[in-house]
Amino acid sequence: MKLLFYVTLLFAFVSQVQSVNFLEQPQNQSTFLGETVVFRCIFNNSTDQAPFWKATNDAIFALNVNPEYGLNSSNPERVVATLTFNATEANNGVCYFLIFSRITGVSPQSEMGCLSLIEPPDAPNITINEVTLTSIIISWTIPALHEDDTIQEYEVLFNNSVESIAADADRIFTANGLTENTVYTFEVRAVGTNTGPGALKRRDISTLAREPPPPPVNLISSVTIANSKTSVNITVEWDAPVPMGLQTPASSYFVSLMSTSSSTKWEVSTSELSASFTNNGGEYAFGDTLNVTIWSYSNFGNSTTYAFLEVYAGFLQDATAQPTVDEDEVTITCEIAYNDESLLCQFVILHVPSGDTQTFELPVTGGNANGITTTRVIDDLSDGAYQASVAVLSDTVGKEMAENRTITLQFTIDEKDYAMSAQVSMIILTLGLIGSLFML
């Protein structure tokens, strides 16, 4: 009896399941946000099982059928069931199916139809067009679109506000009145005509910062030696640098004087364009070579590089040789820091091709406490390369070198330049005379 009972139940279950035949299954659909969605299922039903729609997110929907349907319809062979709603973000990726209610056993159900929303525009790429101290200009690309969507407008989110820019306008946004050396956040997105706002693209951009000044330029030095070389004063002068771009003007300078013999440093800060150092009897020695470095300063820091000058705290400070191009002569200038009439400036001129030398000695006269510059013009020189050495002699010790330092110069004499210049002048003069004769 029990076996007969279970067989009867199984037969009833199979007959009820087979009594529903699905003629058209729900189909997958894709649509835009807010559009009307209709899922449809067509079946024949010889039973009075009540169907309803169910979703994979466990939502249950009341049956919505077209006018042909009815449980007591005269045509149960073709019943149409529909599910209609407006697409929302919550529906994206959800699947729907038609299921028949049963008291016992497995309820018949259709296949699933899933809904996918067409994505809004992708995020555009942001490009930095221009950045200044107080402004930033950005632009962006046209993002990728999906299906038949179009761009309605762009939105720029900046500084807690949203600015809309038409789709056919220039894709440029300018932010003015910003604070220098400050980071600002820009976000841009495209708004789809059918899909709404797309993904945001973010970019953090900093305004420019003012830079420190450049180092000073045109450094020169002067050395004053007094009291038989026990007092040496060094003065360094320079010109203010010219700022370029974002560089700021220099408001002060830091000057460092270092002895190459003892590595001792003397430092001073000044707003002037000069600085002086005096040894006062022993801070640095006579005959010492000193390195001068100068940094520029402003409210935005110190210069990234420094100006450099080498200063010699002895008699002979500088020497130059300037040959005169159109004649056979050379002018040699010697600068002596100590105005002492017992000193002599010695020039030794060597003609390299022949090995011939000429020696000249000039007394130091007519200077002042700051030293003297002695100049000698040497003419009747032959063509060729020359070397000149300049030294300071002391007349009180038999014209021996007053200090262990010599400056070597090189120059070249070429009389061909002068000869050719003379020939050209003679030709011009001759042509002028011939012209005058013809005029007579």
Image (tube, grey):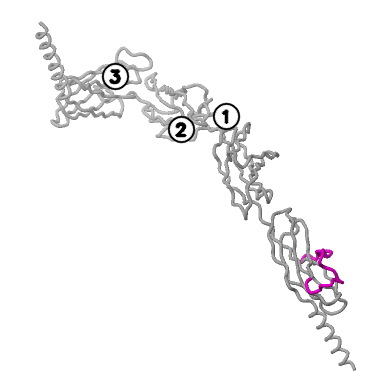
Q: Residue 163 sits in which quadrant?
A: top right
Q: Earlier in the sequence, mark 1 or mark 2?
A: 1
Does any portion of residue 195 appear in the rendered image?
Answer: yes
Q: Residue 36 sits in which quadrant?
A: bottom right
Which residue corresponds to the image point at 18% horizontal and 26% vertical from the top-left? 413
* Residue located beneath label 2 in the image: 306
Q: Earlier in the sequence, mark 1 or mark 3?
A: 1
Question: Is 296 or 172 nearer to us in this picture?
Answer: 172
The residue sitting at the top extreme is 440
- In x, y percent, where is residue 22? 75, 74
Magenta-drawn segment: 56-78
Q: Nearer the viewer, mark 1 or mark 3?
A: 1
Q: Does residue 132 sit above or below 5 in this rendering?
A: above
Which residue corresponds to the image point at 21% horizontal and 25% vertical from the top-left? 348
- Numbered mark located on residue 343 in the image: 3
Q: Amino acid at mark 1?
A: Asn
The residue sitting at the front extreme is 74
Quadrant (top left/top right/bottom left/bottom right) for the N terminus: bottom right
**Horizontal side, residue 328 vs residue 157: left or right:** left
Q: Are the residues tagged 1 and 2 within 8 Å (C-beta)?
A: no
Does any portion of residue 59 appear in the rendered image?
Answer: no
**Horizontal side, residue 6 vs residue 23: left or right:** right
Q: Amino acid at mark 2?
A: Tyr
* Residue located beneath label 1 in the image: 299
Which residue corresponds to the image point at 86% horizontal and 75% vertical from the top-left? 48
Question: Is 41 or 207 nearer to us in this picture?
Answer: 41
Callout 3 environment at 10 Å: few (<14), some (14 to 19), or many (20+)?
Answer: many
